[in-house]
Amino acid sequence: MLGDALYSNRNICSIVDKYGIKPYFLPKTNATFRAKGVPSWKSMLYEFIDDTQFWMEQYHMRSISESVNSMMKRKMPTKIRKKLPQRKETEENLKINMHNLRHTNPEMIKDYRELYLK
């Protein structure tokens, strides 16, 4: 589970650990290694110290997902107009897919538009 420093505390680490999920919460500047009964807290911090580059690669997935939210607010500021829950979900998914295509394969969008406009 990924989270910024807001989620970086022992209580949340223990909750996440109960579900068998590995926490990647950016440590606060005043974080200590004292586990206080939460082993996942200590292991998270040691992993951060031992292999910071790998840890940050995992954590970076959070910023990638946040870029989708930011993009949707910037480039598509209109509210979802659909009324039915299924159609709302479809509209949201299409926006996210278009964002992903723009960043992974822009040519695919061009091909799609050419087919659509015929």
Image (tube, helix red, strand yellow):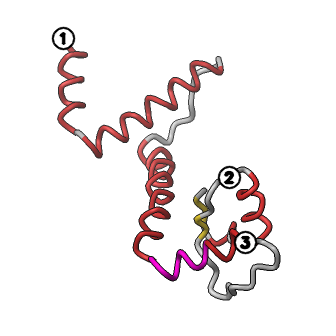
Type of the residue with mark 1: Lys
Give the quadrant of residue 85: top right
Q: Report the front residue among 28 and 96.
A: 28
Real-space CA distance between mark 2 and mark 3, rounded to the nearest whole angstrom: 13 Å
Q: Residues within 10 Å of mark 2 (few under 14, many from 20)?
A: few
In the image, is residue 69 above or below residue 87? below
Label 1, label 2: how far apart the Cα atoms are: 50 Å
Specify the quadrant that holds the N terminus.
Answer: bottom right
Report the front residue among 51 and 62.
51
Q: Which residue is mark 1?
A: 118
Mark 3 or mark 1, earlier in chain: 3
Of label 2 and label 3, which has the lower sequence position? 2
Q: Report crowding for label 3: few under 14, some 14 to 19, many 20 or more residues within 10 A (C-alpha).
A: some
SS at badge 1: loop
Q: Where does the magenta region start and end? A: 44-51
Q: Which label lies toward us, 1 or 2?
A: 2
Q: Position of residue 64 (x, y in %)?
A: 44, 55
Q: Main secondary structure of the magenta part?
A: helix
Residue 39: numbered disc: 3
**Residue to which mark 2 is pinned:** 20
Q: Amino acid at mark 3?
A: Pro
Q: Amino acid at mark 2?
A: Gly
